[in-house]
């Protein structure tokens, strides 16, 4: 465990050995998503959950926004100084935000933050929960900022100190009412939520950060408990054997910051795979499902696919192809060994967030969806969150609007869907986020305490031993 204040300075990021050239649309999309984070986020750094519809701040979206600022500086879309100032304003807010058990007037408690914050006041929005996974996604962006802004400069030095403070005070061990598992969250009204993070999903990041925590870590047995139910999700799905999880975001979020190429824990070693390859297989399986299209939805195909947590047209049942079909509003869509949710809604961001795993199928999908439907689904900040070519029904909509001779399309961009796309484009393009984070001691320590070995972790160990 690294004691607080004793972190080594991050090593200079390694240059990418073979930067990838991007098709014009993909390069443009990366820039448009950066502009979304840069132009719509207020000076406080409290990124909106969605835009342009009114919404609170999503702390997870803040984590993705912090990652976008470093990417923007690297690409020259803003100056490094401007990106550092925006980053510092953001991490200062979370360092100084009020924490306490009171049901109102607080931004968090025990180092965790509420899922949503009021953008004007910076405190808990309505009755939302203190969220362990959303706090982890916030910290992912903060830790990237800590490593990226590593210069001997007053602003960048304060970024590093503020991130250290925020990360160190998170009481991961407190969030284990049913130890060794980590709980989903807590509210002042009902205390701990009755669900714990276990089995394969987006919470890999929760456990890796909790294992490496400088002051309130969890023990290595937490990772074993989390992975104990993996077997229930392993199987052959549309021709690809892998550890399944229905919506693609579960295969993307932790990978935004952690480079899993070549590094394996006990489960992946036993299957001769790593989590990067697992996410690649999951992406291919989703595309294969869209090609098969067992429910006969309009438009699905080899280059029109993408299933994840996203907006949808309405919570309603309607006749489609002569049978009653359930449509949904915001929901986690996708197919796995254990779960099946498909109402004809496609999220282009699901394909975009898998671009680093499977560029050979993700980029053609984005291109075709843009070429076929761009006049409806593509705007100033890239692809709108989702669309549904099969929904042509009257009635109250949950989100978005109907378009004649098209179907339904969302009105909004969602921060937690935009974020993985810009990061994964850049990881494919230059390895920036991954190589920056490979030098972060928190990343290495968490992986090692979870039992990961090999790949770049092994290379780092050999370098350290030789030194």
Image (tube, rainbow, N blue to C red):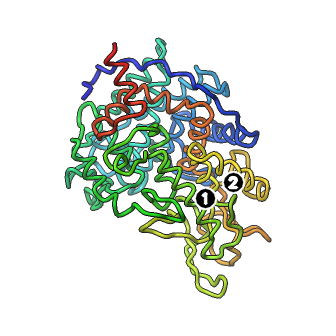
Instruction: Kindly identify the residue that appears in the image at 28 percent across and 47 percent down.
Output: 223
Q: Give whichever of discs 2 and 1 has the lower sequence position.
A: 1
Above or below for 436 versus 179: above
Asked which secondary structure carries label 1, the reply is loop
Query: Which quarter of the figure is the N terminus placed in?
Result: top left
Query: Which quarter of the figure is the C terminus placed in?
Result: top left
Q: Is residue 446 left or right of residue 389?
A: left
Q: Which residue is mark 2?
A: 365
Q: Name the spot of residue 304 as percent of width and height, x first.
A: 68, 60
Above or below for 72 versus 367: above
Rounded to the nearest angstrom, the CA distance separating label 2 from label 1 is 9 Å
Q: Is residue 173 left or right of residue 299?
A: left
Q: Which residue is mark 1?
A: 306
Q: Name the spot of residue 241 as percent of width and height, x first.
A: 47, 59
Instruction: Kindly identify the residue that appears in the image at 27 percent across and 24 percent down.
Output: 4
Residues under numbered marks 2 and 1 in contact, where contact means CB atoms less than 8 Å apart: yes
């Amino acid at each position: 465990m690294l004691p607080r204040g004793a972190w080594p300075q991050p090593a200079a990021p390694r240059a990418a050995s073979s930067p990838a050239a991007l098709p014009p649309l993909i390069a443009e999309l990366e820039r448009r998503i950066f502009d979304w984070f840069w132009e719509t986020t207020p000076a406080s750094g409290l990124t909106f959950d969605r835009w342009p519809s009114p919404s609170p701040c999503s702390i997870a979206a803040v984590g993705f926004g912090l990652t976008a600022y470093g990417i923007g500086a690297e690409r020259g879309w803003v100056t490094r100084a401007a990106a550092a100032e925006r980053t510092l304003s953001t991490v200062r807010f979370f360092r100084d935000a009020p924490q306490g058990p009171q049901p109102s007037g607080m931004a968090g408690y025990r180092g965790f933050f509420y899922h949503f914050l009021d953008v004007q006041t910076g405190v808990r929005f309505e009755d939302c929960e203190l969220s362990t996974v959303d706090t982890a996604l916030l910290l992912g962006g903060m830790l990237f900022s800590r490593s990226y802004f590593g210069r001997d400069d007053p602003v960048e030095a304060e970024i590093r100190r503020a991130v250290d403070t925020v990360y160190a005070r998170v009481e991961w061990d407190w969030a284990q009412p049913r130890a060794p598992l980590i709980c989903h969250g807590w509210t002042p009204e009902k205390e701990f939520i009755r669900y714990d993070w276990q089995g394969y999903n987006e919470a890999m990041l929760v456990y890796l950060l909790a294992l490496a925590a400088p002051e309130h870590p969890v023990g290595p047995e937490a990772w074993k408990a989390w992975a104990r139910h993996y077997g229930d999700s392993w199987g052959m799905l549309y021709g690809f054997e892998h550890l399944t999880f229905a919506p693609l975001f579960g295969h993307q979020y932790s990978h935004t910051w952690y480079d899993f190429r070549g590094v394996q824990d006990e489960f992946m070693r036993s299957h001769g795979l790593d989590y990067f390859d697992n996410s690649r297989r999951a992406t291919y399986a989703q595309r294969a499902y869209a090609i098969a299209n067992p429910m006969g939805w309009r438009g699905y195909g080899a280059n029109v696919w993408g299933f994840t947590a996203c907006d949808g047209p309405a919570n309603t049942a309607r006749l489609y192809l002569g049978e009653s079909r359930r449509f949904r509003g915001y929901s986690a869509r996708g197919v796995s060994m254990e779960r099946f949710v498909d109402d004809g809604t496609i999220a282009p961001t699901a394909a975009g967030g898998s671009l680093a795993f499977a560029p050979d199928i993700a980029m053609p999908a984005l291109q075709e969806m843009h070429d076929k439907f761009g006049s409806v689904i593509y705007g100033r900040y890239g692809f709108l969150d989702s669309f549904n070519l099969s929904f042509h029904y009257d009635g109250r909509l949950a989100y978005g609007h109907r378009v004649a001779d098209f179907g339904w399309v969302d009105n909004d961009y969602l921060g937690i869907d935009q974020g993985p796309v810009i990061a994964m484009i850049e990881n494919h393009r230059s390895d920036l986020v991954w190589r920056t984070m490979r030098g972060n001691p928190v990343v290495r320590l968490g992986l090692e305490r979870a039992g990961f070995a090999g790949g770049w972790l092994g290379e780092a160990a050999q370098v350290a031993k030789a030194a």
